[in-house]
Image: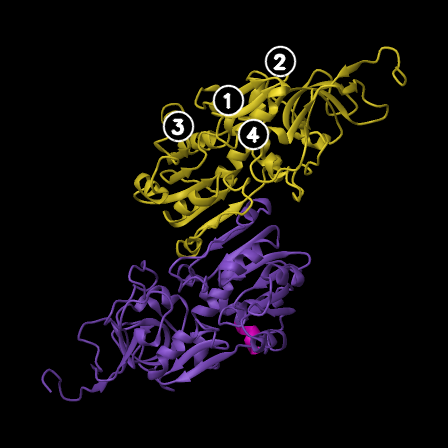
Chain colours: A purple, B yellow
């Protein structure tokens, strides 16, 4: 083949592309898996790029936001039809032009959703520090998701022993860890999720004090009040919308709301109104949004906090994996119907 | 008269009572001025109460909240039909059973809306420290209102030189001072108000960089964007509702929203929805409510900051006064139609 020197390898490289801009609820058909592309497994001469084999792709709700036509710049640039999806993943370095990364090392961070990627944005990948835990943890518990839980709860909310903590999407990738971090702080923890199976998991597997299925409650406000007769000190919000209103109505004085996500709103053409913000004044609440990307400097501190608990078996982390790049669209879209139980990721290869 | 000893004085004591619980927009007829009550001008033997003559009554929007049937406890207890309205005021001490207050001294703080009050809640009145400024300033600039502006802006928002500051109800008792505090910090300041006359005042009298009349703009979002092509760092929110949405859509990264009041919502049976809270996440905003009553410990610090500016003529404070207790209902209800221009208070007596 022209342009390929002796000893160089060209590989087939399956990819996930955005097929068209998404408006409203995303469909599998908004994505396309292409199987006929190839890649030259070689870092170009003089480049500081890193060539990786992608092992795990992390399915995260924020990716939906980047699929809209007028998406704002985020930690990742918005997607456009025909371009490869980019997101968090775990990868093995095949060749490196960058002094910080070496062949054979494992990294987590932003990669292309394809079998092999030539990563030029090397400030967005991180060397994997511990390999005596499942590597897939770096898509969740020990990756962006875990850091999100830690920053959004421990740093943003300043939790204190005995406080009342409410978590929405509580069995999800972030919520399950927030609940366990809150229990480690000595808080009383209640979560909500969208199925009885998930509610059961919260109570039996993740150690939540209580939990309810928001889909089967007649009144969210009453459900929250039933679980928190004394009110909520900290609401870790992954969903926004009506649950946010129910939480606002039950907050205690000086309560804190960590605005982590609003998955209930991402697929709406017209956003729901939140009606009880007046509680921010009367209850002297603080509501704070954050982007985990601004806090990667705290990743070592997070590891220091979390690793002993993982090694002592005090943290449980539930993953929901599917195999094969052709299953990416279903896995990603399933986040928005609550199909996943725990952290959703896709396995492309084992090593 | 039975029970009155020689030398004791009984005075006629006109009062403002809540006539019935208010729902929706308050009416003058929800209040009642009674003219036939009397008071014995004497602190009961052994009591630590303070007997005062009320000089100025401060008309504040938060009083509306206390007139609803199911109002929550506030710094002041909610009102009930037949009870006297209580609120901030300026008074002269006639007799004191409390060692901290002496006859002839002036105080500001919570008093009854009547000509004379026997104040037992003495931790809610404060000795007036400077009398070389108009005493009425202690209903506004140097009272709860001024402290609210200072706490809500300087303490809650941590303003920095060159930041972009937006203020709603900007010509009101709090807003006009926030704008001037922001200018003193070197910020770019835009206010909104509900009449062209008020907008003119903001630009000419209070030194705002720009201002607009929210009642005559076709699109609030577009008006805010026109005034802040680079976005808003700090939104000092006195109104909530649609203007809050317009501000949210124009906030910059790491912006701060001081949730001081939501006067647009106080009279609604069904609260308006706020639709763009997702900006709290994407722009990493902090929205913080506060109650000035929690911050009275900072009153001396506030005076240290503000007094030199007042004495140097760097602070302008516009008051809107009416005379006579019979005008209290109209003055108070006028706050909600925007009738007042500047701090509204009622003069009961000059000394």
Left or right side of A330 for A209 = right
User: What is the chain identity of the residue bearing mark 4?
Assistant: B
**Can you tell which quarter of the image residue A227 is in?**
bottom right
Q: Is residue A129 visible?
A: no
> Pointer 1: residues within 10 angstroms few (<14), some, or many (20+)?
some
User: What is the chain identity of the residue bearing mark 2?
Assistant: B
Quarter placement of the C terminus of chain A? bottom left
Q: Nearer the viewer, residue B69 or B288?
A: B69
Lower sequence index among marks 2 and 1: 1
Identify the residue position indicated by label 1 in the image: B319
Query: Separation of disc 4 and disc 1 at Cα?
Result: 16 Å
Image disc number at residue B333? 4
Image disc number at residue B202? 3
Identify the residue position indicated by label 2 in the image: B350
Query: Separation of disc 2 and disc 4 at Cα?
Result: 23 Å
Query: Separation of disc 3 and disc 4 at Cα?
Result: 23 Å
The residue positioned 79% from the left and 23% from the top of the image is B97
Query: Separation of disc 3 and disc 2 at Cα?
Result: 29 Å
Query: Separation of disc 2 and disc 1 at Cα?
Result: 16 Å
Image vertical order of residue B166 relative to residue A319, above or below: above
Q: Secondary structure at mark 4?
A: helix
The boundaries of the magenta stretch are A307-311
Q: Secondary structure at mark 2?
A: loop
Whether residue A229 is in magenta: the answer is: no
Image vertical order of residue B122 relative to residue A71, above or below: above
Q: Is residue B214 visible?
A: yes
Left or right side of A278 for B256 = left
């Amino acid at each position: 083949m022209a342009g390929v020197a002796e000893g160089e390898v060209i590989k087939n490289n399956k990819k996930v592309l955005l097929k068209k801009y998404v408006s409203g609820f995303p469909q599998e058909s908004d994505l396309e898996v292409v199987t006929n592309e190839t890649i030259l497994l070689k870092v170009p001469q003089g480049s500081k790029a890193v060539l990786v084999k992608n092992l795990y792709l992390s399915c995260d709700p924020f990716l939906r936001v980047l699929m809209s036509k007028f998406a704002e710049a985020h930690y990742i640039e918005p997607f456009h039809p025909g371009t490869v999806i980019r997101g968090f993943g775990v990868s093995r370095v095949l060749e490196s032009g960058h002094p910080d990364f070496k062949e054979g090392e494992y990294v987590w961070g932003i990669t292309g959703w394809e079998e092999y990627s030539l990563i030029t944005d090397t400030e967005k990948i991180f060397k994997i520090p511990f390999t005596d835990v499942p590597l897939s943890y770096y898509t969740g518990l020990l990756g962006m998701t875990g850091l999100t839980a830690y920053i959004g709860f421990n740093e943003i909310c300043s939790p204190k022993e005995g406080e009342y903590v409410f978590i929405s999407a509580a069995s999800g990738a972030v919520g399950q860890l927030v609940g366990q971090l809150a229990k480690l702080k000595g808080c009383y923890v209640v979560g909500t999720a969208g199925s009885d199976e998930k509610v059961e998991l919260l109570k039996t597997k993740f150690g939540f004090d209580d939990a309810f299925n928001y889909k089967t409650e007649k009144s969210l406000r009453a459900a929250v009040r039933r679980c928190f007769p004394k009110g909520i000190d900290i609401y870790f919000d992954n969903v926004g919308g009506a649950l946010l209103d129910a939480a606002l109505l039950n907050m205690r004085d000086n309560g804190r709301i960590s605005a982590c996500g609003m998955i209930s709103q991402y697929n709406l053409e017209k956003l729901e109104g939140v009606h009880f913000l007046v509680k921010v004044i009367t209850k002297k609440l603080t509501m704070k949004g954050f982007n985990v990307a601004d806090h990667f400097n705290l990743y070592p501190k997070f590891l220091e906090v979390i690793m002993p608990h993982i090694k002592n078996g005090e943290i449980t982390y539930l993953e929901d994996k599917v195999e094969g790049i052709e299953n990416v669209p279903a896995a990603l879209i399933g986040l928005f119907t609550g199909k996943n139980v725990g952290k959703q990721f896709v396995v492309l290869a084992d090593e």
